[in-house]
């Protein structure tokens, strides 16, 4: 098994809460440093263009919005095989592309161990570059959940260091 860990934030930052995965990647880059075997990737809405990124990951953490019939701001940890029907579609076209991309990688027999860390959105269809208040209020919690997952999967707290001043 490959020893590298890829953290992939996906979403469209122009559709309110849909961009939360990208916002988490931005926050991680600003506030932390990571060991060389950990990659942070802003996947935006790249869809099938992410195949190389996914195929080359030893393990994969995806950060995204998740529809789970919960309250806006609810945070979830989902293993990829449990994700069917829980990633929004509609205007959030990247999720359909992400599921399709993971399916293609699976057909090639090369899907890495994948964990989705997601948050229930309030609004992912309104044209806005701002997260809604309940999602903005939980951004630090979502980021911490991703950090916890990174440490767990890396097997050491030494994989992550906070940048001083944050």
Image: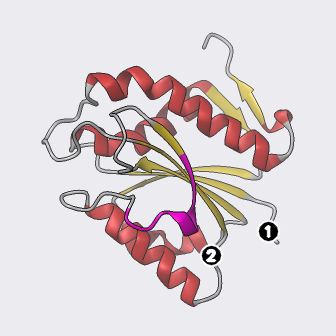
Q: CA distance from mark 2 to mark 1?
A: 12 Å
Q: Nearer the viewer, residue 98 or 69?
A: 69
- Point out which mark residue 111 bears: 2
For the N terminus, which image quadrant?
bottom right
Q: Nearer the viewer, mark 2 or mark 1?
A: 2
- Residue found at x 13% / y 42%: 127
Q: Which residues are magenta?
A: 77-85
Q: How is the image coloured?
A: secondary structure
Q: Quadrant of residue 126?
A: top left
Q: Earlier in the sequence, mark 2 or mark 1?
A: 1
Among all residues in the image, which is located at the extreme top?
165
Magenta span has 57?
no
Q: Residues within 10 Å of mark 1 (few under 14, many from 20)?
A: few
Q: Is residue 86 above or below residue 38?
A: below
- Residue found at x 28% / y 31%: 131
Q: Position of residue 149 (x, y in %)?
A: 68, 43
SS assignment at label 2: loop
Q: Is residue 35 visible?
A: no
Left or right? Give the position of 42 relative to 46.
right
SS assignment at label 1: loop
Q: Quadrant of residue 139?
A: top left
How many marks can you see?
2
- Residue found at x 26% / y 36%: 122
- Residue found at x 55% / y 89%: 107
Among all residues in the image, which is located at the extreme left?
127
Q: Are circles 2 and 1 on residues that touch, CB within 8 Å?
A: no
Q: Position of residue 92 (x, y in %)?
A: 25, 57
Among all residues in the image, which is located at the extreme front?
69
Left or right? Give the position of 108 relative to 134.
right
Q: Is residue 16 visible?
A: yes
Q: Nearer the viewer, residue 117 or 13?
A: 117
Q: Position of residue 24 (x, y in %)?
A: 48, 36
């Amino acid at each position: 098994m490959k020893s590298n860990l890829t953290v992939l934030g996906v979403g469209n930052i122009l559709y309110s809460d849909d961009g939360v995965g990208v916002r988490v990647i931005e926050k991680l880059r600003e506030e932390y440093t990571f060991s060389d075997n950990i990659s942070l990737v802003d996947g935006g809405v790249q869809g099938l263009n992410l195949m190389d990124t996914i195929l080359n990951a030893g393990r994969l953490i995806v950060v995204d919005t998740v529809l789970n019939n919960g309250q806006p701001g609810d945070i979830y940890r989902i293993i990829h095989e449990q994700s069917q029907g829980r990633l929004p579609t509609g205007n959030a076209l990247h999720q359909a592309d992400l599921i399709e991309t993971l399916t293609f990688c699976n057909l090639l027999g090369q899907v890495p161990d994948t964990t989705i860390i997601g948050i229930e959105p309030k609004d992912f269809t309104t044209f806005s570059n701002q997260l809604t208040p309940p999602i903005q209020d939980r951004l630090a919690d979502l980021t911490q959940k991703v950090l916890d997952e990174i440490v767990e999967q890396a097997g050491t707290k030494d994989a992550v260091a906070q940048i001083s001043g944050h």
